[in-house]
């Protein structure tokens, strides 16, 4: 089974967030990523946020 990840270090951020989240499915990763974006980065859950996050999801595992 493939692994997917999203890594905050790959995006410019005022907070210099170093979180990388991974999951076995894009759907599971999307839910965890949205929760992170809302609670840590102060974004509002919206279709636009989910669309942007979907673009950041990559197959594999984040770099150490």
Image (cartoon, rainbow, N blue to C red):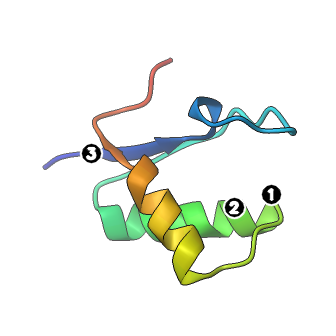
Which of marks 3 and 2 precedes in the sequence? 3
The residue indicated by pointer 3 is 3
Looking at the image, residue 26 lies above or below residue 50? above
At x 51%, y 61%, the residue is 52
Point 86% across, 39% down: residue:
15
Q: CA distance from mark 2 to mark 3?
A: 20 Å
Q: CA distance from mark 3 to mark 1?
A: 23 Å
Q: Position of residue 58 (x, y in %)?
A: 33, 43
Which sits earlier in the primary sequence, circle 3 or circle 1?
Answer: 3
Which image quadrant is residue 45 in?
Answer: bottom right
Q: Nearer the viewer, residue 50 or 3?
A: 50
Q: Are marks 2 and 3 in contact (CB under 8 Å)?
A: no
Marker disc for residue 37: 2
Q: Position of residue 41 (x, y in %)?
A: 80, 57
- Residue carrying label 1: 40
Q: Residues within 10 Å of mark 1 (few under 14, many from 20)?
A: few
């Amino acid at each position: 089974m493939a692994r997917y990840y999203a890594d905050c270090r790959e995006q410019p951020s005022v907070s210099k967030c170093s979180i990388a989240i991974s999951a076995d499915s894009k759907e599971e990763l999307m839910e965890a990523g949205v929760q992170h974006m809302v609670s840590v980065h102060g974004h509002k859950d919206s279709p636009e946020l989910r669309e942007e996050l979907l673009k950041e999801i990559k197959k594999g595992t984040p770099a150490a």
